Image: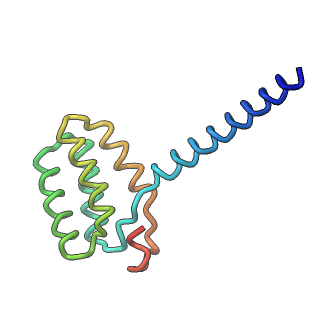
């Protein structure tokens, strides 16, 4: 009978550990990369959100082109550019609503008080 109590305790502890690891993974996987403090980048991301919400493929392409030029110029950090490219790809596949939700969450997580060193989060 003593073994059963210890086994239950071991299972409970294992379960608590597993849930803790899962929570940490979910929290860390949802964090967005910072896009920096360049005003043109912010305006383009805002325009991208409008394009995605309106299912506007022409504006989507225009925003993508501008974002690529910002990445090439160094005003949009590569991790943020990759994240935005994934959102654009999702919209192109027709999953506009999920793309809009992810872009909205990305925008909410941005901090405007960025320094160049902190942009590569």
Q: Residue furthest bottom?
A: 116
Where's residue 6, x and y in %? 82, 30
Residue reaching furthest to the top:
1
- Residue 63 or residue 12, whichever sits in front: 12
Image height of 11 relative to 107, above or below: above
Residue at image x 41%, y 79%? 117
Residue 55: percent from left, percent from top? 20, 40
Residue 7 horizontal/vertical position (percent): 78, 28
Q: Is residue 86 left or right of residue 65?
A: right
Q: Quadrant of the N terminus?
A: top right
Q: Quadrant of the C terminus?
A: bottom left
Tally of numbered discs: 0
Where does the image place residue 53, in percent across and percent down from the top left? Answer: 27, 42
Q: Residue at x 20, y 63 (%)?
A: 67
Looking at the rendering, which quadrant does residue 115 occupy?
bottom left
Q: Which image quadrant for residue 66?
A: bottom left
């Amino acid at each position: 009978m003593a073994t059963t109590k210890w086994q239950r305790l071991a299972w409970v502890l294992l379960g608590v550990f597993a849930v803790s690891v899962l929570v940490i993974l979910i929290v860390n996987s949802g964090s967005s990369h910072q896009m920096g403090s360049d005003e043109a980048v912010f305006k383009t991301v805002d325009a991208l959100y409008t394009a995605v919400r309106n299912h506007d493929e022409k504006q989507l392409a225009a925003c993508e082109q501008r974002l690529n030029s910002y990445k090439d110029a160094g005003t949009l950090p590569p991790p943020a550019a990759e994240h935005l490219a994934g959102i654009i790809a999702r919209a192109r596949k027709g999953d506009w609503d999920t793309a809009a939700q992810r872009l909205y969450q990305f925008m909410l997580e941005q901090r405007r008080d960025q320094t160049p060193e902190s942009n590569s989060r």
